[in-house]
């Protein structure tokens, strides 16, 4: 696993020199604040063999790191930015992760596509949007009984998740090697998401 992460790190550093892929650009920062942080998600749920969707994966966090650590996950990476998806695909090609699907698209649109809606055991997101907006775009992808895991700097609550078929559970808290404390907010899919959700991004953002 370490060897694959180091290869991934080299590809990240190379791509970062060409375009702005991640704000953290030094090797140690990437190891602790991206790799170690993403790996902590493995303590929050059982990932082996699960269908996992990482929404707004960016340069691959947490999704691609999970796939390195737990090769049995059936992973889809989704991002709205073409150059990020091309980078993700190039890392998957390099690491020979031919089973990983890299998708260029918007969550609020794909959430209405029956090929994606309610098709995942676990949906993950880190740093994409505020929790209410994230619940609206992520919960539609979760199969009933499955989980949506939002990685946040502090435990946050969102009482409106029931509107999208979710019920919030106790968060998992963890400490990074550099002493930072982070949280995984957990939502269980307890009912199907009503068909009107997710709405257009503009409406979601305005919090109507
Ligand atoms: N998860 C990564 C990237 C966070 S930056 C990390 O933690 O490092 C947020 C990413 O979400 C960006 O790459 C952006 O393109 C993507 N994004 C934002 N809104 C989105 C949407 N509605 N659908 C899909 N991707 C989205």
Image: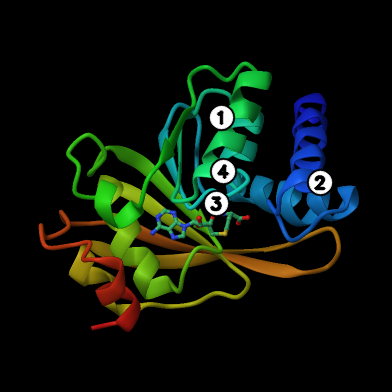
Q: Residue 179 carries which label?
A: none
Spatial distance from mark 3 to mark 4, Cα to Cα? 30 Å
User: Is 123 located above or below residue 65 in the figure?
Assistant: below
Spatial distance from mark 1 to mark 4, Cα to Cα? 10 Å
Which residue is labeled 4 in the image?
Answer: 83
Residue 46 in picture, x, y percent from top left: 50, 39
Discs 1, 4 touching: Cβ within 8 Å: no
- Circle 4 packing at 10 Å, graded few (<14), some (14-19), many (20+), is some
Foreground: 159 or 80? Answer: 80
Quarter holding the C terminus is bottom left
Q: Which of marks 1 and 4 is nearer the N terminus?
A: 4
- Judge from the rendering whether residue 147 lies leftward or rightward of residue 164; answer left or right: right
Discs 2, 4 touching: Cβ within 8 Å: no
Foreground: 58 or 68? Answer: 58
Spatial distance from mark 3 to mark 1, Cα to Cα? 26 Å
Spatial distance from mark 2 to mark 4, Cα to Cα? 14 Å
Q: Earlier in the sequence, mark 3 or mark 4?
A: 3
Disc 1 or disc 4, which is closer to the eye? Answer: 4
Residue under the point 65% across and 29% down: 91
Foreground: 173 or 182? Answer: 182
Label 2 C-beta lies within 8 Å of the nearest ligand 1 atom: no
Residue 135 in picture, x, y percent from top left: 34, 65
Discs 1, 2 touching: Cβ within 8 Å: no
Which residue is labeled 3 in the image?
Answer: 44
Q: Earlier in the sequence, mark 2 or mark 4?
A: 2
Residue under the point 33% across and 39% down: 120
């Amino acid at each position: 696993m370490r060897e694959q992460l180091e290869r991934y790190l080299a590809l990240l550093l190379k791509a970062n020199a060409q375009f702005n892929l991640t704000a953290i650009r030094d090797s140690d920062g990437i190891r602790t604040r991206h790799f170690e942080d993403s790996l902590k998600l493995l303590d929050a749920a059982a990932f082996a063999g699960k269908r996992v969707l990482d929404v707004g994966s960016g340069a691959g966090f947490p999704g691609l790191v999970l796939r390195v650590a737990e090769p049995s996950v059936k992973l889809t990476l989704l991002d709205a930015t073409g150059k990020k998806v091309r980078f993700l695909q190039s890392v998957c090609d390099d690491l020979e992760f031919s089973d990983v699907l890299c998708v260029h698209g918007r969550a609020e649109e794909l959430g209405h596509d029956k090929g994606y809606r309610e098709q995942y055991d676990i949906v993950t997101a880190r740093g994409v949007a505020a929790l209410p907006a994230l619940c609206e775009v992520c919960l539609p992808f979760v199969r009933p009984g499955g989980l949506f895991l939002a990685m946040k700097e502090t435990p946050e609550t969102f009482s409106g998740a029931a509107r999208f078929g979710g019920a919030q559970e106790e968060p998992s808290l963890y400490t990074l090697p550099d002493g930072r404390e982070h949280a995984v907010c957990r939502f269980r899919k307890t009912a199907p998401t009503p068909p009107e959700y997710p709405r257009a991004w503009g409406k979601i953002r305005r919090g109507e």
